[in-house]
Image (cartoon, rainbow, N blue to C red):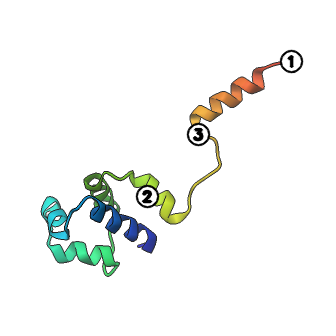
Amino acid sequence: MNEELLRILRLRRSELGLKQKDVAALMGIKCNTLSNWETGRTGLDLDTYVKLCGIYGLDAAGALDTAYGLKSDAPNPGEMQHLRTLRSLDDH
C-alpha cells in the first residue's frame, strides 16, 4: 500500500488519541493485525480501508487523492453549471 496513505491513517489515529488496541477492538481484530497494516507488512483491502476511514472520520476518496496525487483540475458539477450559464450569455 502507498506509504503516504499509511502515514495519513497513522497520523489521523494519533490525532484522535486512539491507540492501536482501541481501533483493533472497534474492528474486532488483533492489535498486531492493525500494526501490520499501518507498517505495510500486510496489505489492506478496500473494505477495511473504508472501515478505518469511517472510524477515523476521514474522507476515503480525499485521502486517496492526497496519497496518490489524483487531484484533478477538472471542473466539479457545480462549476460545470456555472460554465454552462457563462457560455449561454451573449457577448454583452
In the image, taking residue 40 as reference, residue 17 lies left or right, namely: left
Estimate the x, y position of residue 68 in percent, counting from the top left. 52, 65
The residue that mark 3 highlights is: 76
Q: Mark 2 or mark 1, which is nearer the start of the sequence?
A: 2
Give above or below for 66 relative to 34.
above
At label 3, the amino acid type is Asn
Badge 1: how crowded within 10 Å, few (<14), some, or many (20+)?
few
Alpha carbons under labels 1 and 2: distance apart: 43 Å
Mark sitting on residue 56:
none
Estimate the x, y position of residue 48 in percent, counting from the top left. 28, 61
**Helix or strand or loop: what does disc 2 sit on?**
helix
Pick the residue in front: 68 or 21. Answer: 21
Is residue 12 visible in the rendered image? The answer is yes
The residue that mark 2 highlights is: 63
At label 2, the amino acid type is Ala
Mark sitting on residue 92:
1
At label 1, the amino acid type is His
Q: Mark 3 or mark 2, which is nearer the start of the sequence?
A: 2
